[in-house]
Each structure stands twice: as structure tokens, then as C-alpha cells.
Image (tube, helix red, strand yellow):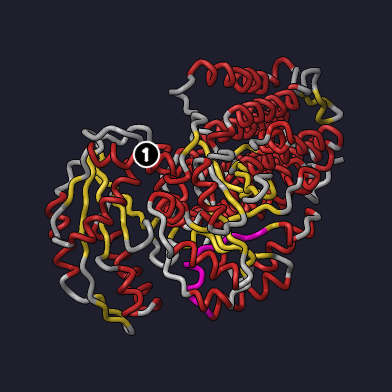
Amino acid sequence: MWDFSFVIPSYFILMLFIIHYLCMPRLPLIKSRVFLTILIVDFISISMNIISTWFDIHYLEYDLPLLYTVNILFFVFFFLRSYLFYVYTQVLVNIYPKDKPVEIILCTIPLISSCITAFTAYFNHKLFYLDSNGYNGGPWLNILYLILFFYVIIPFIILISHRQILHRNRELYAAIGYLSALFLGGILRKLFPGLLIMDTLVLIAIIIIYLSFENPALYIEPRIEVFNTFGLYDYIDEKHDIKDQILLGMIIHNYQDLRVIYGTRQMDSGLYMIGKFMNKHFKGSKIFYARKGRFVILTDRHTDIQKLISEVYNRFSQPWRSHDTEIYLNVNFTMLDNSVIKGSLSLMIETLLSKLDTSDIINNQQLLQVSQRDISANEYYYTVKKAIESAIENNNVEVFFQPLVDAYTEKVVGAEALARIYDEFGEEISPVDFIPLAEKNGSISQIGKQIFCKTCAFIRNNDIQQYGIEWINVNLSPIQFFNTDLPNEYSSITEVLGVDPSFIHLEITESTLSDYTFFEKQIRLMTEKGFLFVLDDYGKGYSNLMRLKSCPFINVKLDMDVVRSYCKEPGNIIPNTVNSFKSMGFKVTAEGIESASMADAMYNIGCDYLQGFYFSKPLHMGEFLRYLKPENQNK
């Protein structure tokens, strides 16, 4: 006897789910169309499961052809639903029928064969048959499970082999999650065929896909009700050929300043009115909001761009008014014709946005054209940005240690932890390139946290004190330092990894003293947790010696340019500065030591520690441990 307790609630939940999904604005993505097809086919499949089961329970009341028909339809849609999850996984990792037609055809053969078997069940009785005792499974009934598991295992293989396509680890885990739900559903159906529980597991798989990949709200900028940058990049990633379209960029002039002048609420109200105007004015085009007052319009190449721009300028010559808002705005435009400009679509978008920022600075209300030269100039920047994103997302920021030596004994007593990242080809990207960019876009905080965590793990896993290491310095960017949760966050990490916070010296630059009230509070909280601080790159800023006197630094590091300048042209300023620091109780480190003469010069003026290529370049963790062995150290 069959139990409807699982399938009926799943049916109504799915019905509400479909209604909600259809009412939301959606991008015309291939994977979204496949997902919508899954919803519809699953709805039909559950319907046929309920109907066929009901008919089979009351088989004496219905004609044999009708009983066969409803059961055949159930099996066909069951097979089709399994196949569609396989198709969705392929599209998720950017595999389309035109890319691998042979593999697609081969994987479609089981679906076609099983459907033929279902359609001919009335004659061959292989899949099921009906007699005086009602519904009976045929000798080939297990084909149902073979097809299901085939269309789950193959996607698993595709997913693992193409996992690098997914931009975030959570996307990979979500994909594994929905495939696992399908697999579990097949097992439960095999073990408990009367419970009709598999449809509930399929619904769970659908919900995982919706929450992780297909929620239309993920692609909508809520303040404006136009598509956001997530939608933009997913759209261009999927649209392999958009040569018949033009990318048009629009930026609100002085957007950041205007948010301060008008206030957040009024500007958001203005953006909403602009979004409505854009959706109405650019009918047939795709409108995306790319933050910071920037819009990207993907429009047909036959559109009269100059006419459209003229009409937009005319609208912006008037104030934007609502019941509580009146704001005055100006805009600038850039255009990229991707039929004549070569490069990846993502790179072209990045260049268009960069050109938009340039147009905002110029502000002459002339349409700026993105050129191939602009694309080429932006290519390395884009490579570095992608490398940073990949390193953060995959926890691949690597830690190198540069030794710090005692100026008197030239023995290694400490080290500075330094970040290193690599591009997609495994080539190292210079810190000179990625650190400024990471600081500009805010990702330096995630990089810094990875370095801190990995340094703590290195200390825990290796008895480096046996080599005479007394501390390891870890850089703390100004952005990190101004994070109010930093004391608790870093303290929790040291507690979990079992590391004494005083073993880690946090290097901060003079820019962190800009807000001295906050600086004092943050330093106090951090020192209460056991952390010690080093002032890095002294000489680059304009620190007041008397203010530094009140700061709880244990060490001041002279910037390498200061060291080189002194070694090239000795004078009294640096020796006097070093003496002042030492009289305040600070130890002094000289950076950028590249020769024995530089080491001697800095030793002679009283520096306590030395760091530079003369002693060692930054070393990978394993190399650093080998370097610490007495026989390998430079003396």
C-alpha cells in the first residue's frame, strides 16, 4: 500500500514555489530556463505519481488502457526529470550542447531508451504490467533506478572535473548538495517504495538550487529594481556570442559626493526613479547597476545610440522628483562595440567600468569610446584582480617568511610573514601589483586574515623556538586595524590554534594613527588580548615623535628607502632618530639591508635588528624551516 503523507505536501509546496518563481523578474539565462523546465517537469512528475498511484490503488474502477497510460506518463516524466538535473549541472559548469555534442548525445541515449521501454510497456510488460492483482513491477523495473543513478553519478563526475568553473566553494558544495539529495532520494525509493518519499528529496534538491543559483533576488539591486553585477557577469559568461549587441555605460557624475550632499535616503530614492526610467526608456535592452552610480546597458547594435543618449541627457537636465525628493544629477557615457574589440567579455566589462570612471573625471558629456588599447592596458589589472579573488575564495594565499636577524650576532631571531599569490598559470604576482589593488578594493582584509591564520597554524605545527625564533611579525593593514571586531576575531583564532598572542607581533603603519582616538582604543583592546605592536615603514609618513612616545610599540622599523638614503649619504638625522627611539624604550629594525656595508652602517648607529636580501629573500614555509638549521644560515 502506498503512503501519500510525503508526496501531497511536497506537491503543494512545489506549486507555490513555481508561482513565486514565475512572478519574479528573471534574466534570460540558459540555466534559468533549464531550472524552470525542471520545476514544470517535476510538477507534472509529482502529479503523475499521485494520479498513477491513486489509479493503481483503485485499479478495479478503471479501464486497463487508462491505467497503462497514467503509469507510462509517470515513468516518462520521472526519467525526463532525472535527465534535466544532469543537463542543469552541465550548464552550471558552462558546458552547452554545441560544446560537446557527442557526449550530450551519448548521455541522452539512456533517456530515449528508457522512454521507449515505458511507452511499449503495454505490449512487452518489461517495466511494469497490470493484471487482476493490480500494478506489478516488471523484470526491468530496476531500470528506473539505473537511469536515476546514471543521471546523478555522471553530473558528479562533470562537477568534480569542472569545479574550477564555479567561482566560489559554496557553489561547489551546493551542487554536491542537490546531487546528494537526488541520490538519497533514489536509495529511499528503492528501500521504501510505498512511502513516495523521493519527490520530497527532489524538492529539497530544487530548493538548494534555488537558494544557491536561481533565486531571482540574487540578480536584483533592491534599491533600484534593475539587475546587478552578479546578473551582468552571469549573463555575459553564458552568452558566448553577443556580437550583435553594444555595451553602453552610464555614470552619475560625482556620485559619492552627492550621496553626502543629498543623503543616503534621497540618493537611493533618486536611483530608484532612474532605474524605472531606464527600464522604460531602454525597452528590449538589459539594464544592470554596477554600483557607485554606474549603469551598464546591453543593447542591440542597430539601436540609435546617439538619439538615446540625447534623450537621457534631456531627462537629466530636469530634477528627479518624488513626494519627498528633489535632486539634480548629471551623467556621462562610454560605449564599447564588442564586434570590433577583442578580449574576454569579463575583461571588456571591467574596462568599460574603468573608462566610465575616467569619463566621470573628464565630465565633458561626450561619449567616450572604449578602444582595443584600453582593453590591453586593463588586461594585467584584470588578471591580478581575478588572482586575488581566486586566492581568497580558495584559501590559496601563500605565506612566505623573511628572516629578521639580531644586528649584534646576525642570528635569526624572528621573521616577517608576507603574502604571495599566483595567477591561473602558477606565475607569482608581485606584491607591488596586488597589495595596492587589494587595499583599494578592500580584499586586503581577507588576505591579512588568511596570513594570520596560516602563521598561527605554522607556529602551532612547528617547534620553531628550538631554532631561536622569538617572534613572527604579521602585517595589519589600516583597513583591518579599523575593524572594531578585530580584537575578538584575532584572539579567537589564537585560542583555537593554541598560540600565544605575544609570539605574534602585529606590524602597523603610521596611517593607522590618523584617527588617534580610535587608535588608542584599538591598541588598548588588542594589548589586553596579549598582542604586541610594531610600527612599520617609519619614514614614509609624518609621525610626531612625541605622539609615538605614548604608543605601546615594542619595535620601530625604518623604511628601506630611509635606510638606503642614509647608507648612500650618511648624516645625523637617522642616528639621532634611532637614539630617540631607543631612549623611548623601542627596539629598532632596519629594513632593506642588501650588503655587508649596509648591515655594518645600521649596526653602528644602534639598530637592534636587520632585515633584507643580504640575509635572505622571503622563503616559503618549508624553505624557511630548512634555512633555520644552523648549517644553512649566513654568518
Asked if residue 385 is positioned above or below residue 571 in the image, the reply reads above
Q: Is residue 355 left or right of residue 59?
A: left
Residue on which disc 1 sits = 380
Q: Is residue 18 highlighted in magenta? A: no
Q: Residue furthest bottom?
A: 324
Residue 360 sits in quarter: bottom left
Give percent across and percent down for residue 185.
Answer: 76, 38
| Residue 384 visible at all | yes
In the rendering, at what x and y percent does residue 18 appear?
56, 52
- On screen, residue 205 above or below 603: above
- The magenta segment: 505-516
- Image x and y of residue 233, in percent: 42, 45
Q: What residue type is labelled 1?
A: Tyr
Q: What element carries label 1?
A: helix
Instruction: Judge from the rendering whether residue 325 lies leftward or rightward of residue 477; answer left or right.
Output: left
Decide which of 483, 12 is in the foreground and name it. Answer: 483
